[in-house]
């Protein structure tokens, strides 16, 4: 049962990534609605890694959760290195960095946490 909690957490974090991608449609809106700058390749990265995280949680495959988390952290590092540079592969800013970094660290925490051995009560549920 405890292992399923981690799987649910991975699904929620992956779904948060997919919901975060909806900020791509907030262009031209009032400034308070444009909280996260999601454009271009960054949108593709967020959607793809969000789907991988959700699949990892649904299927109970920790390796997929870890891959998605590592991908988000790598994308956050790339965004950090390209801050205020002429080249910006992901097309984001500090808010994109924060979104990707937070999701990546959360997914890595969920994926790398040791699961307790199953007990008789866990097998019943």
Image (cartoon, helix red, strand yellow):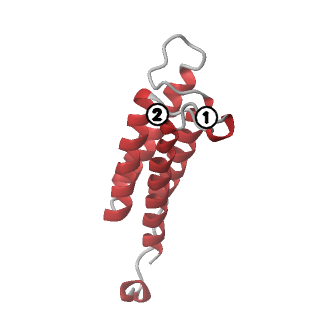
**Disc nearest the viewer among 1 and 2:** 1
Above or below, 117 relative to 66: below
Q: Which mark is residue 119?
A: none
Task: Please report the residue visible at 44 percent of the width from the left and 49 percent of the height from the top.
Answer: 18
Of 2 and 57, nearer the camera is 57
**Furthest residue in direction right, as rendered:** 32
* Left or right, residue 107 beside residue 94: left
Q: How many marks?
A: 2
Query: CB under 8 Å between callouts 1 and 2?
Result: no
Above or below, 37 relative to 109: above
Badge 1 or badge 2: first in the primary sequence: 2
Residue 12 screen position, x and y as percent: 48, 60
Quarter that holds the C terminus: bottom left
Above or below, 11 relative to 89: below
Residue occupied by mark 2: 74
Above or below, 119 relative to 103: below
Of 115 and 71, nearer the camera is 71
Task: Please report the residue visible at 50 percent of the width from the left and 52 percent of the height from the top.
Answer: 16
Q: Secondary structure at mark 2?
A: helix
Q: Secondary structure at mark 1?
A: helix
Question: Could you tell me how far apart the alpha carbons at marks 1 and 2 are, in whole angstroms?
Answer: 15 Å
Of 4 and 94, nearer the camera is 94
Residue occupied by mark 1: 95
Residue 51 screen position, x and y as percent: 36, 50
Residue 59 screen position, x and y as percent: 31, 63
* Other-residue count near label 2 (Cα within 10 Å), few / some / many at <14 / 14–19 / ≥20: some
């Amino acid at each position: 049962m405890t292992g399923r909690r981690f799987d649910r957490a991975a699904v929620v974090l992956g779904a948060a990534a997919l919901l975060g991608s909806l900020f791509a449609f907030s262009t031209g809106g009032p400034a308070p609605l444009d909280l996260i700058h999601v454009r271009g390749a960054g949108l593709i990265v967020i959607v793809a890694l969000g789907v991988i995280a959700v699949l990892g949680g649904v299927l109970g495959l920790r390796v997929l959760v870890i891959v998605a988390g590592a991908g988000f952290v790598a994308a956050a590092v790339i965004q950090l290195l390209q801050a205020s540079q002429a080249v910006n592969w992901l097309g984001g800013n500090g808010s994109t960095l924060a979104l990707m970094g937070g999701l990546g660290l959360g997914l890595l925490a969920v994926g790398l946490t040791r699961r307790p051995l199953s007990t008789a009560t866990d097998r019943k549920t």
